[in-house]
Amino acid sequence: MSELVSQHQHAISLQRINAMVLRYWYLLMSSWPRLLELVYWPALQIITWGFLQNYISQASGFFAKAGGTLIGAVILWDILFRGQLGFSISFLEEMWARNLGNLMMSPLKPIEFLLSLMIMSLIRLAIGVIPMTLLALFFFGFNFYAIGLPLIAFFCNLIFTSWSVGVFASGLVLRNGLGAESIVWTLMFAVMPLACIYYPVEVLPAWLQAVAWTLPPTYVFEGMRSLLIDHVFRADLMVWALAINAILFAASFAIFLALLQSAKRNGSLLGGGE
Amino acid sequence: MRLLSQWLNDGHMQQVGTGQAQSPAVDQGGSAAIDVAHLVKVYKTTRAVDDISFRIARGSITGLLGGNGAGKTTTIAMIMGLVLPTSGSVEVLGARIPEQRYDVLGRMNFESPYVDMPMRLTVRQNLTIFGRLYAVQHLRERIDQLADDLDLKEFLDRSNGKLSAGQKTRVALAKALINEPDLLLLDEPTASLDPDTADWVRQHLETYRKTHNATILLASHNMLEVERLCDRVIIMKRGKIEDDDSPERIMARYNRDTLEEVFLDVARGRLREGAPEGTP
């Protein structure tokens, strides 16, 4: 090999991560439907739920008092859902393009690949959610950013959960091919009823509450209601969410690597089909 | 630390304390480019590769011949570390595969009909990304050089999806050469190309081998291609090596004028003349 290639093959390489982010950026910029799709659904969501909030706040004293809980929940749910989709769709792009073999044969390491998907998830999220928050402000007078510093805790916890789910779902697709693609689109909805997005945890039966408290988003949505309704920031909830997220994150990585190994045993990396 | 190492290296533990050099755990010349020993791959009940062994010298071009399902692609995939062997060992440029593959991936590259380059990206964008993944220095100049060598200039800024099959093959070859690899693994490099483009690709591979002393292992169904390009041919059938020699000696052994006739003899189980009893 000539002196053409630099020899730092062992550590995590920012250059390789940057190359992958650039790859997804090129793709995003080359396709206006992809860009539109990022903004379209969040915008529709916020407008629909915003008008619903307006309507029920006129009829209910509670919702009048707890102004913005519904809109806030919609935005936070979108961070969770779009964060995972942003991660997983970038991964699926490689499967659709039949490019995974090229990447797996390059010096790109799985951890670098996953880190680039996380960065892309943030970029895609920003493109989708920032217009959503501006619409909430413009149409319904709900200033999402007025939540202040707690918003950082909410965001971090939700994005960590979304990445954990994204890593796990990507591992399943890697192992089982595009036949498992529907899992990517639907897995987060399994979390939805238990994460208590639009209602407090007490609404659930006692045994289900125990299950709900194993999910980091439950702490975030409870924390949001506490902040918007009682004007109290529950740091304890955020710490619990972070601790569970750390476990989920590590577990999802371990599962991804196990599924990658399984794909290599199974010989499915070169095909990637159905 | 072990867990961290596992995360960094796609689940393969780097062996420590074995007394062998670690990183870079590869030799810089002298030994074989590829050393395969008693390699076996079993998919459920199918024995795709059945106890094969071979060594490939540096700077050589070796053809892996065989019908569909002979085990060529699985063998190449195991050499690349994309498929894990059931048993046996693979060493590439002195590194054990898959355990030490990240030590040598930057010195290898490949082209296969089983993979594509992203369609929406332009040729230049694709080459830029792969150049960065391979940490190619002076990347812009390298892309320009490849565009000259492989005649890509006129469509360098066209998206990959809008290229003809021949143009795509040249782009895939440019990607495979972007890091000036010491070892090039090619699976059907001229499949679906017209004779002129296929000849042109072969010429380029020959030139690359000569100028870079590169090792090339190619799987092909194109017997003329193998005859023309390869110093050595490994014929596989049902996961086993049926024959392994220079094209001339193999043709002489089978008393045939072309490798295609030899291929048909092997595929149809005809006994080769002068072969020891018990061999096909």
Image: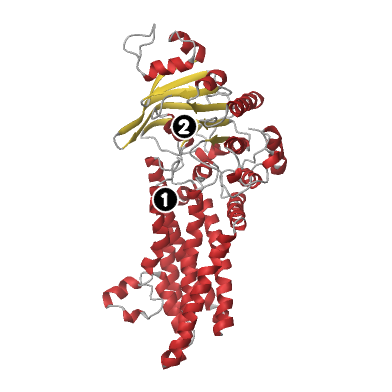
- State the image coordinates of residue B178 (x, y, percent, origin top left): 63, 38
Tell me: B277 left or right of B33.
left
* Residue type at numbered disc 2: Ile
Residue B70 seen from this side: yes
Closest to the camera, between mark 2 and mark 1, is 1
Q: Give the left or right position of residue A25, taking residue A101 as reference.
A: right
Residue at left offset 48%, top offset 78%: A48
- Labelled disc at residue A178: 1
Query: Rounded to the nearest whole Å, what is the CA distance between mark 2 and mark 1?
Result: 24 Å
Chain for mark 2? B
At 41% from the left and 48% from the top, the residue drawn is A177
Residue A31, by quadrant, is bottom right
**Given contact means CB atoms under 8 Å apart, are the residues at marks 2 and 1 in contact?**
no
Residue picked out by circle 2:
B76
**Colour basis:** secondary structure
Residue B46: quadrant of the picture: top left
* Residue A75 visible from this viewpoint: no
At label 1, which amino acid type do we have? Leu
Identified at 41% across, 70% down, the residue is A216
- In this orientation, which residue lies closer to the viewer: A258 or A176? A176
On screen, residue A110 versus residue A13, left or right, reads: left
Q: Residues within 10 Å of mark 2 (few under 14, many from 20)?
A: many
**Dot 1 lies on which element?**
helix
Return the x and y of residue A59 as percentages of the image width and height.
42, 92
Q: Is residue A75 above or below residue A8?
A: below
Q: Give residue A70's mark.
A: none
Name the subunit of mark 1: A
Tag 2 secondary structure: helix
Tell me which corner region of the image, top left, top right, bottom left or bottom right, holds residue A192: bottom left
Residue B66, given in percent of the width and then of the height, sits at 42, 24
> Pointer 1: residues within 10 angstroms few (<14), some, or many (20+)?
some
